[in-house]
Structure formats: C-alpha cells, structure tokens
Amino acid sequence: MTVREQPAKEHRRTRQRAAVDEVLDQTEDFISAQELHALLRTRGAGVGLATVYRTLQTLADDGRVDVLRSDAGEAVYRRCVREEHHHHLVCRSCGATVEIAGPTVERWAKSIADQHGYSEVSHTLEIFGTCPRCAAS
Amino acid sequence: MTVREQPAKEHRRTRQRAAVDEVLDQTEDFISAQELHALLRTRGAGVGLATVYRTLQTLADDGRVDVLRSDAGEAVYRRCVREEHHHHLVCRSCGATVEIAGPTVERWAKSIADQHGYSEVSHTLEIFGTCPRCAAS
DNA sequence: GCCGTTTTGACAATGGTTGTCAGTCTTGAT
DNA sequence: ATCAAGACTGACAACCATTGTCAAAACGGC
Ligand SMILES: [Zn+2]
Ligand SMILES: [Zn+2]
Ligand SMILES: [Zn+2]
Ligand SMILES: [Zn+2]
C-alpha cells in the first residue's frame, strides 16, 4: 500500500455507488473490478462495467479502498478496517488477507530515504504467503 | 521486489539476447519492454517486440533482472548491481534508483508472516520519493 | 556441413482499462 | 413540488501492454 494522501471531495449518492460500496463492505479479500462487476450482475443489481471502474478509482483516490496489483497485473481493491496507513499479508492461494501495521518498517523506510536525501517519501509493501488453512490441505 | 527463487537454466546465445542484455547493462533506471524495444529500433539493432518480452521474462525468471510495476501498471525491468535479494528507492520524477538491502525488514516481514502462520513467504517493497537533484530544481 | 532443437518475428488475439457521448439521475435552489 | 446545471451512467469503441501462433531462421553439438 502506498501512504495515504489527498483530502477527499464530495460525491453524489447513486444506486450504483451504493451497490459497489455494499459489495466492498461484505468482501474480505481483495477483489478486481471485473469480479466485482460480475458479482453485481448475479445479484441482479446490474452496474455498468465502466461505472464499476470509475467508482473504484474514485474510492481509491479518496483513500477509501486499498489497491494493489495481483500477480497478473490486475488491480484489486479492498475496503480495509484500518483507516490509517497499513500493509497486507495476503494468502497467495485463497486471498485471505491480514492487515499489518508496522511502525518499525515505517521508520525504516523513512530513514533509508533520508539517508539518500529523498523527500516526499511513500512506499509500497505487501507480504505474500500461504495461509495456515491452505497449508493444511 | 519479490524474494529470489529459481535456479537458472541454460539458454542459447543469440544476437537479440545480446542486444537486450547490452541495453540493460547501460541503463541505470527501470525500463519497460516497449521502451527497450523502441530503443533497440533507433540503434539499428532491431529486435522483435515479442522477443524483447520473452527475453525480459526469461531474465526475470532467472533472477537476472528485477521487475516491478510502474504506476501505470506497466512492467519495468532493471539489471541490478546486487545479485542478492534487495529493494529499491526510486525517484518519482527522474527514475534515479538506489538499491536497498535491509536485513531489518527482511526479519520483520518474516516474523509477521510467522505470527500469522503464513508459510512460503515472499514480499514486495519499494520506496518512492524525490531525489536530491530533482528536489533542487 | 548436418540435424534436432531453440529462437525469432510478423501478426493475430487477448484482456484489462479508459474514452466517448447522449441520455439519466442527484442536488440545491426556487 | 419543480427546475436547471451539471454530475453520473452505460453500451460500445478504442487503447495498449502482453501473450499466442507458427513457419522460417539461427544455434550448438557432432
Ligand atoms: Zn489461503
Ligand atoms: Zn507503510
Ligand atoms: Zn530525481
Ligand atoms: Zn526483502
């Protein structure tokens, strides 16, 4: 995850955004725009694909969802519990995600950047592995 | 960067691979397959786009180049000095890259994963900022 | 040089994401 | 409630990075 930035603008409440929001609230794992779109289809509450993309992008810009890229390079989104800056420990096979807060790394990253004179620092950090459940099977 | 894996197989020496290799050796910053391809064109040493992609993929698989994704989601490659696992501090505006080795984070990541019972752990971590030179202008 | 295998490259095909733009809906004001 | 201004939507086209195809060319070992 990249460190949070922007303020956050005002947006209109529409059926489509509510639908996307609801899915995000009910989904534990990171989900792609395509998956979200398909899911909405099956639920009857159809929302245009372009709209799903736009909505997710807006949410991401406002820092209301976290975005990262799957191995395939596809963008995946998640509504996290933690509002503040954090990272993720993700299961490679089932997607189970744990939110990670790490003052240690935050300091480390900052100090590294300082040492090299870099300013306006941000960073991305994700940990991948096989969760206990998947390891068991 | 993801932690290194694979062993490394044998490949044939071809003009095309040599050309790609040469560009990588002369390029400090991360470069995309498309850019590399265009560069080779201007140099006269034309190499098919598909070949550039395949070559970079192979190099990446063998751990001979590092790969990460640009903001636009495009894959970018770099021949790093360090052979061992490491990360990068990249200038957002000019691309200047510093290789970072961090036993601290490595341990931290591992311990986090352990705490949650995740196995076969790997991770990605990149730091972005504005380099001193760019900050000055 | 010869041959089996690998590699190449022009081109098609894929697939995620964004652009278009006319029609629709939300909102704030009257 | 009514209305106008402008934000939002959606079907579809357009983009564009990346991968698949497959016959022709290049490699390496003999
Ligand atoms: Zn799992
Ligand atoms: Zn962080
Ligand atoms: Zn710079
Ligand atoms: Zn590391």
Image (cartoon, coloured by chain):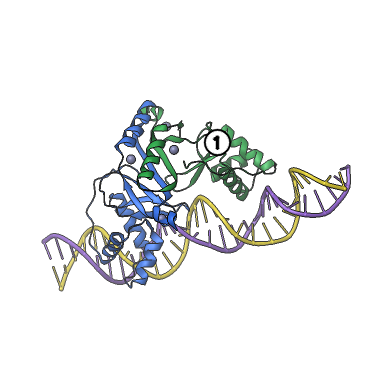
Chain colours: A green, B blue, C yellow, D purple
Look at label 1 and name its amino acid: Arg
Chain of the residue under label 1 = A
Q: Quadrant of residue A95?
A: top left
Q: Is residue B115 visible?
A: yes
Q: Is residue A44 visible?
A: no
Residue plotted at (52% across, 34% down): A84
Q: Quadrant of residue A27?
A: top right
Left or right: A69, with B100 as reference point: right
Which residue is label 1 attached to? A79
Return the x and y of residue B70 as percentages of the image width and height: 44, 52
Left or right: B127, with B102 as reference point: right
Left or right: D21, with B65 as reference point: right
Direction front: furthest residue: B136
| Residue D29, above or below A128 | below
> Toward the viewer: A4 or C3?
A4
Residue plotted at (33% across, 73% down): B44
Q: Quadrant of the N terminus of chain B?
A: top left
| Residue B30, above or below B41 | above
